[in-house]
Amino acid sequence: MGRVEGKACVITGAGSGIGKAIAVRLAEEGGRVLCVDINGGSAEKTAEGIVGSGGIAEALQADVSDSKQVDGFVQRCIESFGTIQVLVNNAGVNIPGVLHEVPNEVIDKTLNVNVKGAIYGCRAAIPYMLRQGGGSIVNISSVNGLVSEPFLAVYSASKGAIVMLTRGVALDYAKKNIRCNAICPGWVDTPINYAHAEMLGGLQKVYNTIDSFQPIGRPGEPREIAHLALFLASDEASFITGSIIAADGGMTAQ
């Protein structure tokens, strides 16, 4: 038996990066996975890869900043798998900039996707989890929800909000067997970080000097974050709720 054998799982932002790695990892351990992404083609590729490896997966295009579309993908999970037991709120954007130059459009997009998307996801999934007697929500925050970096004021604000959302949901539903935890990845090798890298002098410069801020001395890999998400989604983490777990190569230990 896999660690999430038969569990119905929704992963947002599953078309690439950490979200894709989480979808694949959950499917490897027996999860029935709905891959959600604003890029429908990318979601399809993730699902096809899972099915091709013997797993169970479907794909759906959706924008997490639209509450109706969020309600829609939760309903799709119910229709396809009969329930929803795991929700991974992973979809996010990272648009760096000098704060006093950041346009309203960037602020709105960052908060709508990163914050409202997670709130909408929790709100849509929790009623079904209550009816079935429990579930696990894993929110993907960021090390920048704990500490900030140059050019990331808006992004950091959005990821800090995820930290407090996680704690609030955990407290509200602790006695209902609904667990909610957050992962705060450090610098992981995914395209979401590339624009920020350019503002810091380029990706190669960042990687050449990464031990100056990430003591492990290298970027993380998406699958390393996926292992942690799998644990939090599984019954092995049954006593863990409201936890904010940094997977950051030692960044916040300094």
Image (spheres, rainbow, N blue to C red):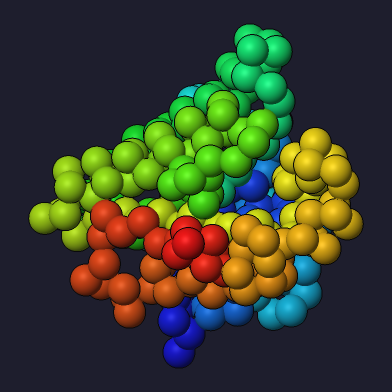
Residue 185 image position (x, y, % from top left) = 55, 58
Q: Nearer the viewer, residue 39 or 174?
A: 174
User: Residue 221 vs residue 144: left or right?
Assistant: right
* Horizontal side of residue 213 vs 162, given as left or right: right
Residue with the most extreme bottom position = 1
Q: Position of residue 249 (x, y in %)?
A: 57, 69
In the picture shown, does residue 119 fall above or below 249? above
Q: Between residue 218 and residue 239, name the one nearer to us.
A: 218
Question: Visible in this render: residue 17?
Answer: yes
Which corner quadrant of the image does residue 107 belong to?
Answer: top right
- Of residues 209 and 64, the one nearer the viewer is 209
Q: Residue at x 54, y 74 (%)?
A: 227
Q: Quadrant of the N terminus?
A: bottom left
Visible residue check, residue 84: no
- Which residue shows up at 74% across the image and 79% down it? 53
Q: Residue furthest top?
A: 104
Q: Position of residue 208 (x, y in %)?
A: 82, 63
Q: Residue at x 21, y 71 (%)?
A: 239
